[in-house]
């Protein structure tokens, strides 16, 4: 389980077991108040009992702290609150099964403190917690993913060069075909977008918010080319657009060697890529004429699969629903593949039947929900 406290002190939970952290209704002054500071941790839990339990975490110290409810023998986490400010009280609601528990306090700029252990008995067997993921656990996955993105950018650069040459050669059909290949190259790199910085907007930005829409000089990249290629714009006028895209991709390819994918992004993007697919591709909001949103959605799934593959050693012992994720990944891929025509073109979203759209939306929505806990499980935690 992973929970965060965000603006206004409301706790947002992602469930990977039985424990949840929320702003619970009915929290009261009778709930145990747990003291949190640099010098003491976990004092105040005098009546351990099984079942639903709400704790009032009181930061009596002078710095912000993170608080974990753990098994003191293994370090497995059963509840967590981040960003507990000095002098504040926040609730943590958990469902406790039989076993040993302790609070671990991690004040800013200070070593972790583990409070006294308590034993809960007389209830049900406790559900699975989450073994903390450390920076070291993510070194291998990050190195592997970084290498995949580097290779992907090399392929992207080569394929964007073919787009440029087709447009220079005044061949609209070849330009459209090359555009789709190159665009899908880019869409498979979803977990690295944060590391791309402003290059992402230049390469794959939309006309949303631009003062002149698709006619804006600030509208560049793949979607600007898509608009021109599929709306019969003079190809000579598209040559500078293609050259700019080629230049932007080459700059990204060279600069990425000095960039680093954030460890937090791997797990986070596994969910966000599919969430964005649901929001932008299955609604055709990013269709500028090619009608290839479902091809993009399929490439997004490949990008998600790449993240799952490198994170699998981390996730396998921590996320019991991983096999269910795999099942829904395959199901969703098959649903998207059914929209591919015998001539390898793709059915535009707007031409799908109501039943096809409902199935796709349902499959991608379910997959999005199953992927949501991965961000919390794979986020590196302090343990000392």
Image (cartoon, rainbow, N blue to C red):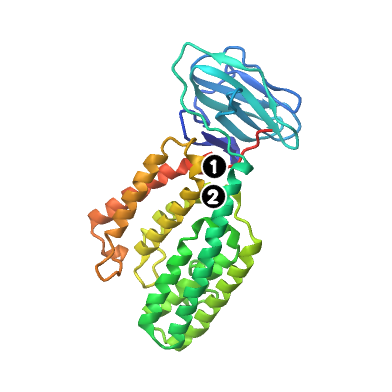
Asked whether the viewer can see residue 384, the reply is: yes
Residue at numbered disc 1: 378
Left or right of 325? Residue 71 is right
Q: In terms of depth relative to the viewer, which is nearer, 104 or 46?
A: 104
The mark nearer the N terminus, 2 or 1, is: 2
Residue 61: x, y in percent? 74, 29
In this rendering, position of residue 202 left or right of residue 84? left
Which of the labelled discs sits on residue 27, or is there none? none
Front-lying residue, 215 or 122: 122
Relative height, residue 102 to residue 357 (above, below): above
Tell me which corner region of the image, top left, top right, bottom left or bottom right, holds residue 144.
bottom right
Q: Residue at x 74, y 34 (%)?
A: 63
* Residue at 53% across, 17% down: 99
Residue 107 x, y percent position in the rendering: 71, 33
Quadrant assignment for the C terminus: top right
- CB under 8 Å between discs 2 and 1: yes
* Label 1 residue SS: helix
Give coordinates of residue 172: x percent, y percent.
38, 83
What SS does tag 2 mark?
helix
Q: Nearer the viewer, residue 349 or 267?
A: 267
Name the residue nearer the viewer: 268 or 147.
Answer: 147
- Residue under the image location 37 percent in, 76 percent down: 177
* Residue linked to disc 2: 266
Residue 213 visible in image: no
* Distance CA(mark 2)–CA(mark 1): 8 Å
For image coordinates 43% across by 35% down, the residue present is: 320
Give the answer, above or below, for where 79 lies relative to 232: above
Dot 2 crowding, Cα within 10 Å, few <14, some 14–19, many 20+: many
């Amino acid at each position: 389980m992973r929970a965060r406290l965000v603006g206004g002190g409301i706790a947002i939970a992602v469930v990977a077991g039985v424990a949840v952290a929320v702003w619970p209704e009915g929290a009261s002054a009778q709930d145990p108040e747990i003291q949190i500071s640099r010098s003491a941790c976990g004092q105040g839990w005098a009546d351990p009992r099984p079942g639903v339990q709400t704790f009032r975490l009181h930061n009596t110290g002078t710095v912000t702290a993170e608080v974990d409810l753990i098994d003191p023998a293994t370090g497995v986490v059963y509840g967590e609150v981040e960003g507990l400010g000095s002098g504040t009280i926040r609730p943590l609601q958990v469902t406790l099964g039989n076993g040993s528990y302790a609070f671990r306090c991690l004040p800013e700029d200070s070593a972790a403190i583990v409070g006294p252990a308590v034993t809960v008995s007389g209830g049900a067997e406790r559900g699975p917690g989450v073994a903390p993921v450390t920076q070291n656990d993510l070194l291998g996955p990050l190195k592997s993913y970084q290498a995949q993105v580097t290779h992907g950018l090399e392929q992207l650069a080569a394929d964007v060069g073919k787009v440029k040459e087709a447009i220079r050669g005044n061949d609209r059909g070849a330009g459209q075909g090359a555009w789709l290949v190159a665009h899908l190259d880019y869409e498979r790199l979803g977990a690295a977008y944060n590391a791309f910085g402003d290059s992402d907007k230049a390469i794959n930005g939309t006309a949303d918010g631009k003062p002149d829409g698709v006619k804006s000089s600030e509208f560049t990249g793949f979607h600007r080319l898509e608009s021109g290629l599929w709306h019969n714009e003079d190809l000579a006028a598209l040559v500078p657009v293609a050259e700019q895209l080629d230049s932007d991709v080459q700059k990204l390819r060279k600069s990425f060697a000095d960039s680093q994918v954030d460890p937090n992004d791997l797990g986070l993007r596994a969910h966000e890529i599919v969430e964005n697919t649901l929001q932008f591709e299955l609604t055709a909001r990013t269709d500028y004429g090619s009608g290839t949103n479902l091809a993009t959605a399929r490439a997004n799934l490949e990008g998600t699969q790449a993240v799952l593959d490198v994170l699998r050693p981390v996730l396998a012992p921590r996320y019991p629903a991983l096999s269910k994720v795999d099942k829904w990944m395959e199901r969703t891929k098959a649903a998207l593949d059914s929209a591919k025509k015998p001539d390898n073109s793709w059915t535009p979203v707007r031409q799908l039947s109501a039943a096809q759209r409902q199935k796709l939306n349902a499959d991608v929505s379910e997959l999005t929900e199953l992927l949501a806990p991965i961000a919390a499980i794979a986020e590196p935690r302090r343990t000392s």
